[in-house]
Amino acid sequence: MLQKTLIVLKPDAVKRNIVGELISRFEKVGLHLQAMKMIQPTEEHLYDHYETIGQLASRRGEEILKINTDFMRSGPVIAMVREGVEAIEVVRKMVGSTEPKSALPGTIRGDYSHLSFGYTDKNNAWLTNLVHASATPEEAEKEVSLWFAQAEIYDHEMEAHQFKRGHKKSH
Ligand code: GDP
Ligand code: MG
């Protein structure tokens, strides 16, 4: 099934100048770009993103919500909508698990970061894990419409027929 998913390159990815490298990973697997912008999200926007939609405080505690909101306000981010077959799961697989220390090599978090929950908690540090990606179809639908107006999404069709058996290139 074709799905749209929200990807946000966090302030640490922008500051480290690896935006192009990270975007190219999503391009290489064939995920189709439908929207992209650089923004500095407001506190209210992040509350909607992480709590109203993501329920971060109820899952991880108020403190984590606050720390993470501060981190996400520490600089501009790049937000994207990409479409692909089972794109939500595919992008989560590419991003890797939340804690960089546990994220497997080959994933973005595993390849570009290494901090642990324990270290960041003890040392008053941000969990710089580079990327946000929608976790479920419900989350994806809500997040895409929180971050992008309908007019900003170029819903040009992914050439799904390119996967179909018997398809011949016309050029
Ligand atoms: P994700 O879907 O893998 O990003 O993880 P969650 O939805 O559970 O959490 C959202 C974000 O909150 C994570 O990407 C982290 O940036 C942050 N976060 C979650 N759990 C912790 C934690 O225990 N400590 C810290 N410092 N940040 C956390
Ligand atoms: Mg999440």
Image: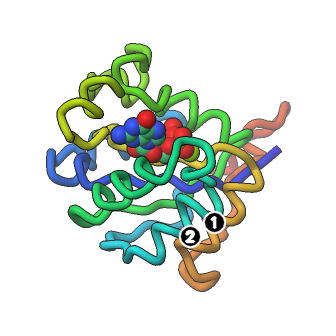
Residue drawn at 84 percent across, 31 percent down: 165
Reading the image, the residue beneath label 2 is 48
Residue drawn at 57 percent across, 35 percent down: 92
Residue 3 lies left or right of residue 5; in this view the side is: right
Q: Are marks 1 and 2 in contact (CB under 8 Å)?
A: yes
In which quadrant of the rendered image does the N terminus lie?
Answer: top right
In x, y percent, where is residue 81? 55, 60
Give 72 or 96, whichever is nearer the viewer: 72
In x, y percent, where is residue 110? 36, 21
Give 162 or 63, whichever is nearer the viewer: 63
Q: For the image shown, how many numbered marks are present on the structure?
A: 2
Q: Amino acid at mark 2?
A: Asp
Residue 104 visible in image? yes
Q: Residue 24, located in which quarter of the rendered image?
A: top left
Give 42 or 26, whichever is nearer the viewer: 42
State the colouring used for the structure image: rainbow
Mark 2, Cα crowd under 10 Å, few <14 / some 14-19 / many 20+, is: some
Reading the image, the residue beneath label 1 is 52
- Determine the secondary structure under disc 2: helix
In x, y percent, where is residue 100? 36, 25
Residue drawn at 18 percent across, 33 percent down: 123
Q: CA distance from mark 1 to mark 2?
A: 5 Å
Q: Is mark 2 within 8 Å of ligand 2?
A: no
Residue 154 lies left or right of residue 132; in this view the side is: right
Q: Amino acid at mark 1?
A: Thr
Mark 1, Cα crowd under 10 Å, few <14 / some 14-19 / many 20+, is: few
